[in-house]
């Protein structure tokens, strides 16, 4: 019988870093993403596209909001899951040009769980919900597109019109947006 | 003056029974046990960190027992809220607490009632936490009513095990798990030393039969009233979403809708036996609860935690069954660790198949039936390239891989010794299987 008490005390004091098992052939990232993808539970406004079903590490998420400022739009995000997943979050970009305080014109997305608040316990599903939420509640406090954020803060009506103008395909200020209505 | 001393003064004889066990030797002591004041004062009361999973019938008893026994650093996880029907046996809750988190109310009650004890509540699912969280505990005690949750925590504790360069298990990575279960007047207690003794997965057949049916059966060839109920629950409800909400087993309107649809389906397939009670039973997965059984099982669990924490006595080895239907009966035996256990088997898990001529669908049926999986997704690696064989949950992948179900394994590039990766909700990790064709010998490097 093992005597756990003394051993345990050492362990807790030392906080030894655990070794990673080497018996697995498929990478941890691969095994984990398989699990994540198999358990994707998408809201009805979201859909995924896997250009290559063999490659679960890169795919697209399509969000078609059914309420809020962006209702009627269709927004495509690309997901790239790296070899260090889930210790590092996937890289997510918005491929559809969008007039949004938290998404810039290069498609960078400002969402806490994609950066500072990422934890290995989070999943692809958590990110999907996070992105969906961005369209329901654009957050002017934490802007990537400052102009859009300012407009949202100062005049929601004007913001709403700008969003619609952009989604229909047109210029907001000096920036041209391609049409992205469904 | 520190808190421990204050409390000692307030209740001078509070720990005298503990001291009798821990500070002197005796005929039933573990052979290596050395009586000492350190065990009580330092380990139990300061260092030892216990995780209680579940704050229901067993959980209330466990928390009370552990706290009164002197454990001071206890965490409790429970995702449920308090319901009126809990109050007859979940004695840490009062009527005013209905609707609140079980974990939070239980922790508050214990912390107020037992001086010096610090229970930290987590109003969460166990799946909300990662390895780092679970690694901080010395012992995990479970009072759960779900097999899926038990399997998950079991898999988690096994994934925390580390091995040295010789491939030997490092004992410091072991977090013992004491698992209690009750069903009416029957109960069981088991002690699991992950990687050493039989785990939950090793002994899955000891649990009452799972109420999961292969999706293909409930969708195309129902035979039992349960199949019809499951069909409505799993397929029709999400499709029609009659009340724009998830199924609530406590809502008679929901149950009635399922009952009506399941009856229609049963008639269609000439199946008898669908009734309201059965529907409720299947949907809610009802397990009757008896307070005295919970008390007995929790007491035995707490004793095991104490024995493991102090090494004062040999722990239960390793499975105790309890029955007080008629008189009182207990029996203890040693459940055996399986070498090819899905979770704790160190050798690659072997999946024996008849031949590589079988269809992928047959392989998946074999997984759902033999390992009670629910909706497995299967991938493999062929010449270093990842290959998705079938993934049921993502429609775009499902469409593109559906054809594979009809192909035989050989045509998909699988052979004797190939590894497949299987993801399913019943396990926290993707599992790796090595295919073994019954007639051929293995060729695993
Ligand atoms: Zn096992």
Image (cartoon, coloured by chain):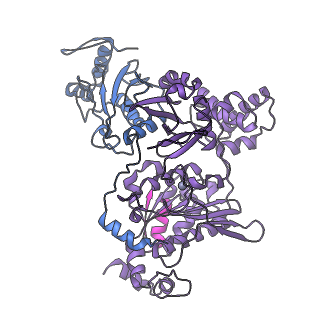
For the point 75% across and 37% down, the residue is: B225
For the point 42% across and 61% down, the residue is: B169
Q: Position of residue B222 (x, y in %)?
A: 73, 32
* Residue B274 lies in the magenta stretch: no
The chain displayed purple equals B
Instruction: Name the one closer to the observer, B97 or B400.
Output: B400
- In the rendered image, which quarter is residue B133 located in? bottom left
Tell me: A39 left or right of B180: left
- In the rendered image, which quarter is residue A163 located in? top left
Tell me: A116 left or right of B243: left
The chain displayed blue equals A
Q: Position of residue A100 (x, y in %)?
A: 28, 25
Q: How many dots with numbers?
A: 0
Tell me: B199 left or right of A95: right
**Magenta-colored span:** B104-124
Q: Position of residue B28 (x, y in %)?
A: 56, 83
């Amino acid at each position: 019988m093992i005597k756990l008490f003394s051993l345990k005390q050492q362990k807790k004091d030392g906080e030894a870093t655990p070794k990673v098992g080497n018996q697995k052939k498929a990478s941890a990232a691969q095994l984990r993403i398989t699990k994540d993808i198999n358990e994707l539970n998408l809201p009805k406004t979201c859909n995924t596209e896997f250009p290559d079903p063999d490659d679960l590490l890169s795919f697209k998420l399509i969000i078609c909001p059914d309420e809020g400022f962006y209702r009627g739009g269709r927004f495509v995000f690309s997901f790239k899951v790296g070899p260090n997943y889930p210790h590092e979050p996937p890289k997510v970009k918005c491929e559809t040009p969008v007039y949004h305080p938290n998404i810039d014109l290069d498609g960078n997305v400002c969402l806490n769980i994609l950066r500072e608040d990422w934890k290995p316990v989070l999943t692809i599903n958590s990110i999907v919900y996070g992105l969906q939420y961005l369209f329901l509640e654009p957050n002017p406090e934490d802007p990537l597109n400052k102009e859009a954020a300012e407009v949202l803060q100062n005049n929601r009506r004007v913001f709403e019109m700008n969003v619609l103008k952009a989604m229909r395909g047109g210029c907001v200020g000096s920036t041209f947006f391609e049409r992205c209505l469904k | 003056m520190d808190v421990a001393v204050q409390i000692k003064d307030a209740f001078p004889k509070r720990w005298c029974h503990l001291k009798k066990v821990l500070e002197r030797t005796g005929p039933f002591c573990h052979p290596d046990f050395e009586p000492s004041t350190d065990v009580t004062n330092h380990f139990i009361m300061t260092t030892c960190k216990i995780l209680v999973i579940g704050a229901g019938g067993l959980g209330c008893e466990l928390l009370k027992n552990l706290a009164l026994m002197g454990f001071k650093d206890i965490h409790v996880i429970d995702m449920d809220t308090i319901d009126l029907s809990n109050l007859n046996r979940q004695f840490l809750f009062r009527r005013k607490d209905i609707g609140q988190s079980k974990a939070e109310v239980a922790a508050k009650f214990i912390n107020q009632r037992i001086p010096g004890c610090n229970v930290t509540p987590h109003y969460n699912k166990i799946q909300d936490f990662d390895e780092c969280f679970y690694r901080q505990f010395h012992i995990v005690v479970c009072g759960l009513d779900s097999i899926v949750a038990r399997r998950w925590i079991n898999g988690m504790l096994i994934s925390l095990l580390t091995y040295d360069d010789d491939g030997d298990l490092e004992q410091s990575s072991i977090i013992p798990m004491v698992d209690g279960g009750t069903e009416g007047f029957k109960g069981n207690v088991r002690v699991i030393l992950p990687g050493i003794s039989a785990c939950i997965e090793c002994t899955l057949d000891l649990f009452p039969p799972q109420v999961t049916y292969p999706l293909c059966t409930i969708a195309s060839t129902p035979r039992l009233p349960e199949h019809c109920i499951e069909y409505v629950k799993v397929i029709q409800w999400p499709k029609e979403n009659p009340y724009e909400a998830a199924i609530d087993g406590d809502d008679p309107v929901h149950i009635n809708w399922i009952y009506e649809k399941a009856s229609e389906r049963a008639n269609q397939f000439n199946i008898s036996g669908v009734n309201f009670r059965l529907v409720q039973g299947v949907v809610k997965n009802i397990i009757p609860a008896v307070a005295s059984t919970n008390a007995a099982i929790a007491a035995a669990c707490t004793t095991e935690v104490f024995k493991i924490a102090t090494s004062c006595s040999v722990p239960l080895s390793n499975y105790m069954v309890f029955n007080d239907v008629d008189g009182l009966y207990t029996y203890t035996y040693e459940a055996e660790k399986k070498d090819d256990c899905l979770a704790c088997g160190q050798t690659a898990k072997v999946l024996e198949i008849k031949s590589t001529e079988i269809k992928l669908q047959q392989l998946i049926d074999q997984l759902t039936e033999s390992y009670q999986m629910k909706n497995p997704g299967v991938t493999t690696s062929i010449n270093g390239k990842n290959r998705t064989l079938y993934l049921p949950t993502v429609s775009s992948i499902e469409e593109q891989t559906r054809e594979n179900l009809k192909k035989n394994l050989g045509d998909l590039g699988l052979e004797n010794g190939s590894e497949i990766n299987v993801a399913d909700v019943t396990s926290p990790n993707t599992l790796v299987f090595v295919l073994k064709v019954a007639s051929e010998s293995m060729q695993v490097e």
